[in-house]
């Protein structure tokens, strides 16, 4: 439509120049034709000289669901002419959502001066845990009169893990498993007369004793590792995250599982109970084990769970799980399953399914 109006105006200028024999109008007509022709090539020039970058910014304590995730698109113009209008087409989705077509679209308009850089800010909120993916799909640029445009497909993306909100829940019966913090509680005569049995190794943490450093392993990896002893492990707890699921898990169920796992882990850290969190990786056919004793460990374990864990068929990995379970020496061994039950010692300690069903029903009504 703009082109038709522009050409009609040019023809009117030509007509008036002929009727009134005015050189000024004829000059104006030729100028309009030249501008029209030049505008046809401008979008291609702009596209050639625009570079894009996209970044999702992470908060100090990580990105969490139901909180805005800030993003930034950096547009760099390498050309000698300013770009007065460009439009970026973005899509974002949760990669944990099994429905692949659940993408939300977003358009951003902007401009950038010649040989300059502009930054475009945006925010995204997701109600579920998972992996937020934001992708630039298309870039469209216009000439100065917006008569012509040109577009090109773009495939730039960034991802961010969306953590649970960190809600606390109450569970009874954990007091007897509180860690003994005083290193003096380890019998000194036993330490001197018989070296303790080494159970595992972990990364060095501030405050660890120098005598517990695994020097050979540290030298090979150029990083300090600490030996953990069987008598320490006995004062630990174990939480098995059973990802076996019957049918196809929806996003809300995965979200609820991640949220419950995070809340349960926080109980142990709050009560100063060392925790071994483990689950079976069906894709890699291997066991994933995370040691959790402080706040930073919670984020690392939950982020690893969200990023790489997959729900899988009921029969997957049974032999590997049973074998590893038989080797666990912890005083307390718990299991969180995909029916949202926390079990231990052969009984159900907590059942969260009904509360979750009520919450989902309330959300669907609202």
Image (spheres, helix red, strand yellow):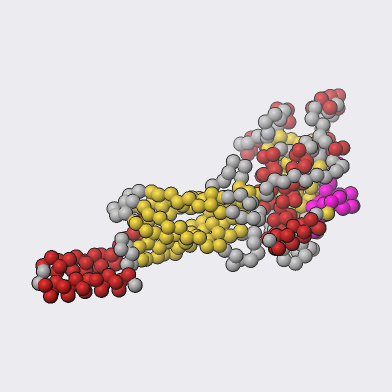
Span colored in magenta? 331-350
Image position, residue 286 (x, y; %): 72, 54
Q: Residue 86 versus residue 339: which sits nearer the camera?
A: 86
- Residue 233, quarter of picture: top right
The residue lying at 33 percent from left, 67 percent from top is 148
- Along the viewing direction, whichever of 299 and 9 lies nearer the viewer: 9
**Chief secondary structure of the magenta portion:** strand
Magenta stretch: includes residue 195? no
x and y, in percent, of residue 341 in the image: 82, 54
How many numbered circles are shown?
Answer: 0
Which residue is at 39% across, 59% downward?
Answer: 86
Of all residues, the one furthest to the front in this rendering is 20
Horizontally, residue 73 falls left or right of residue 92, namely: left
Say whether residue 154 is visible.
Answer: no
Quadrant position of the C terminus in the picture: bottom right
Q: Is residue 318 left or right of residue 3?
A: right
Q: Residue at x 61, y 59 (%)?
A: 95
Up-down: is 223 above or below 70? Answer: above
Query: Where in the figure is residue 24, as x and y percent of width and height?
Result: 13, 65
Is 172 drawn above or below residue 26 in the view shown?
above
Is residue 241 placed above or below 298 in the rendered structure?
Answer: below
Residue ID at (89%, 52%):
347
Give residue 184's position: percent from left, percent from top.
81, 25
Left or right side of 173 for 93: left
Residue 348 belongs to the span the image colors magenta: yes
Q: Is residue 75 visible?
A: yes
């Amino acid at each position: 439509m703009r082109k038709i109006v522009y050409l009609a105006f040019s023809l009117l200028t030509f007509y008036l120049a002929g009727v009134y024999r005015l050189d000024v109008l004829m000059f104006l007509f030729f100028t309009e034709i030249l501008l029209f022709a030049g505008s046809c090539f401008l979008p291609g020039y702009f596209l050639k000289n625009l570079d894009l970058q996209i970044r999702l910014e992470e908060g100090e304590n990580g990105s969490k669901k139901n909180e805005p995730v800030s993003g930034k698109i950096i547009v760099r113009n390498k050309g000698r002419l300013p770009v007065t209008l460009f439009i970026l087409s973005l899509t974002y989705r949760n990669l944990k959502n099994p429905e692949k077509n659940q993408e939300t679209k977003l358009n951003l308009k902007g401009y950038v001066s010649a040989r300059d850089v502009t930054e475009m800010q945006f925010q995204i909120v997701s109600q579920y845990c998972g992996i937020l993916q934001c992708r630039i799909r298309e870039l469209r640029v216009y000439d100065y009169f917006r008569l012509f445009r040109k577009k090109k497909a773009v495939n730039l993306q960034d991802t961010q893990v969306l953590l649970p909100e960190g809600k606390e829940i109450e569970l009874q019966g954990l007091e007897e498993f509180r860690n003994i913090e005083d290193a003096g509680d380890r019998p000194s005569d036993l330490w001197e007369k018989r070296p303790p049995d080494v159970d595992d190794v972990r990364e060095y943490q501030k405050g660890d004793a120098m005598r517990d450093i695994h020097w050979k392993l540290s030298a090979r990896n150029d990083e300090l590792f600490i030996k953990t002893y069987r008598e320490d492990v006995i004062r630990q707890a174990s939480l098995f995250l059973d990802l076996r699921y019957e049918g196809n898990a929806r996003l809300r169920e995965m979200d609820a599982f991640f949220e419950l796992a995070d809340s349960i882990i926080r109980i142990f850290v709050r009560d100063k109970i060392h925790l071994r969190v483990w689950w079976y990786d069906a894709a890699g056919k291997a066991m994933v084990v995370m040691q959790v004793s402080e706040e930073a460990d919670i984020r690392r374990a939950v982020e690893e769970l969200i990023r790489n864990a997959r729900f899988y068929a009921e029969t997957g990995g049974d032999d590997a799980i049973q074998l590893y379970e038989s080797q666990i020496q912890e005083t307390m061994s718990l299991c969180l399953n995909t029916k949202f039950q926390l079990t231990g010692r052969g009984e159900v300690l907590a059942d969260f399914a009904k509360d979750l069903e009520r919450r989902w029903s309330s959300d669907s009504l609202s």
